[in-house]
Image: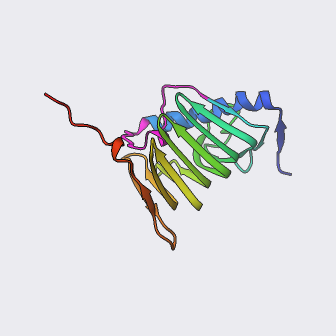
């Protein structure tokens, strides 16, 4: 029989904080020089997670956050309808005890990411800890930085280098750049 547990919203927030502290520690351990500040994780700031429900399946090593999921770390906010976290660890590793390692995170149900002047929206997202790759995808992925807007259907960001690739998926990639957003040369 599979071990299964449903937790209240308040309990879910407390356990989720421990769960994603593993995520932040792993991300911080690698040199992240991401130019996509909105997709950058920081190991030195606390993470707050809220959702309507949290279900943990210890034997499957999965945690399901559902309903109005919101993750906040520093100035970065992520919202989604559902977040599924896959974790690994030695025998006896548990999300609730904080000794599990995050493997992958899947986001579904209109994903919204915001940090500073950068915002991104998509239908779904996936974060792979091993490759430090974040992918947003859907019928239309929109990335904006101030007045500059980029549209496609798949955005792939390599967190370690900040390299980003926007795919059109059959159509064309659209970019709208505001010339007023360019940095003006410094007068010496």
Of all residues shown, which one is farthest toward the right? 1
Q: Is residue 54 visible?
A: yes
Specify how the rendered protein is coloured.
rainbow
Q: Which residues are magenta?
A: 29-47
- The relative height of residue 100 versus residue 60 in the rendered view (above or below) is above
Please report the residue visible at 83 percent of the width from the left and 50 percent of the height from the top.
2
Residue 78 in the image, given as x and y percentages of width and height: 60, 40
Q: Is residue 136 visible?
A: no
Residue 43 in the image, given as x and y percentages of width and height: 48, 30
Please report the residue visible at 37 percent of the width from the left and 39 percent of the height from the top.
31
Magenta stretch: residue 9 in it? no
Please report the residue visible at 39 percent of the width from the left and 42 percent of the height from the top.
34
**Left or right placement of residue 179 versus residue 98 in this view:** left
Q: Split into 4 quadrants, where in the image is the C terminus? A: top left
Q: How many numbered marks appear?
A: 0
Residue 131 in the image, given as x and y percentages of width and height: 46, 52
Q: In this rendered view, identify the residue nearer to me: 121 or 76.
A: 121
**Left or right placement of residue 10 versus residue 156 in this view:** right
Q: In this rendered view, identify the residue nearer to me: 168 or 28.
A: 168
Magenta stretch: residue 35 in it? yes
Q: In this rendered view, identify the residue nearer to me: 12 or 184.
A: 184
Specify the principal SS of the magenta part.
Answer: loop
Residue 133 in the image, given as x and y percentages of width and height: 47, 52
Of all residues shown, which one is farthest toward the bottom? 170
**Left or right placement of residue 42 versus residue 55 in this view:** left
Q: In this rendered view, identify the residue nearer to me: 5 or 157.
A: 157
- The relative height of residue 186 versus residue 179 in the rendered view (above or below) is above
């Amino acid at each position: 029989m599979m071990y299964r547990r449903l937790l209240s919203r308040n309990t879910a927030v407390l356990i989720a904080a421990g769960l994603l502290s593993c995520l932040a520690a792993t991300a911080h351990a690698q040199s992240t020089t991401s130019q996509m500040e909105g997709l950058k994780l920081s190991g030195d700031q606390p993470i707050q997670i809220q959702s309507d429900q949290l279900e943990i399946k210890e034997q499957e090593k999965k945690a399901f956050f559902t309903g109005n999921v919101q993750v906040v770390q520093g100035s970065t906010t992520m919202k989604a309808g559902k977040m599924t976290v896959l974790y690994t660890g030695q025998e006896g590793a548990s999300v609730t005890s904080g000794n599990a390692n995050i493997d992958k995170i899947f986001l579904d149900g209109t994903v919204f990411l915001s940090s500073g002047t950068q915002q991104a929206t998509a239908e779904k997202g996936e974060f792979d800890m091993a490759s430090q790759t974040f992918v947003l995808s859907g019928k239309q992925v929109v990335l904006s930085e101030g007045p500059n807007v980029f549209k496609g259907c798949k955005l792939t960001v390599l967190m370690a280098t900040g390299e980003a690739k926007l795919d059109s998926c059959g159509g064309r990639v659209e970019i709208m750049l505001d010339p007023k957003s360019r940095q003006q040369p410094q007068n010496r």
